[in-house]
């Protein structure tokens, strides 16, 4: 009998909504000098990826980990 991979159930909001997720190109270059040389920090090379300050890994904004903490809400304009 063949086993098929079960679809993963997303346990909550993605990394893009986490306060530890850094995806701003200028902040990434400031914290990781020279990172821009690896590809386009503003273009499709990076896509929705960013850097997790907790795991020290590049992650997709759609990924999720147990260190998730929501970003602080912005005040209404």
Image (cartoon, grey):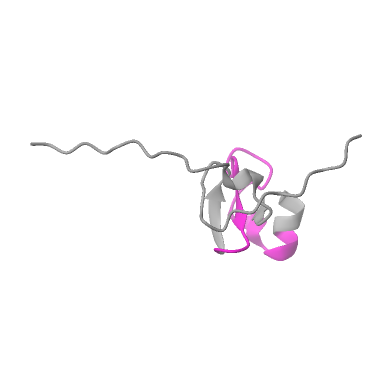
Q: Is residue 46 left or right of residue 9?
A: right
Give the number of callouts.
0
Q: Is residue 36 something one can see in this rendering?
A: yes
The quadrant where residue 74 appears: top right
Q: Give the farthest residue toward the left.
A: 1
Residue 67 spot, x, y in % from top left: 56, 58
- What's the residue at 67%, 63% (across, down)? 34
Quadrant of the frame with the C terminus = top right
Q: Specify the segment rendered in magenta.
A: 29-55
| Relative to 2, 64 lies left or right | right
Taking the spot 29% from the left edge, 37% from the top edge, the residue there is 6
14 left or right of 24 in image: left
Q: Nearer the viewer, residue 19 or 27?
A: 19
Q: Where is residue 24 in the image (x, y as percent from the top left)?
A: 72, 49
> Which quadrant of the rendered structure holds the N terminus?
top left
Q: At x 88% / y 36%, what residue is drawn?
A: 76
Q: Nearer the viewer, residue 41 or 12?
A: 12
18 versus 8 height, above or below:
below
The image position of residue 2, as x and y in percent, is: 12, 36
The answer to whether one can see residue 33 in this image is no
Viewer-side residue, 32 vs 9: 9
């Amino acid at each position: 009998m063949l086993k098929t991979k079960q679809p993963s159930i997303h346990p909550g909001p993605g990394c893009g909504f986490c306060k530890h997720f850094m995806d701003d190109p200028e902040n990434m270059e400031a914290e990781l000098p020279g990172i821009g040389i690896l590809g386009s920090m503003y273009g499709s090379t990076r896509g929705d990826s960013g850097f997790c300050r907790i795991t020290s890994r590049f992650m997709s904004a759609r990924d999720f980990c147990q260190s998730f903490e929501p970003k602080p809400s912005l005040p209404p304009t």
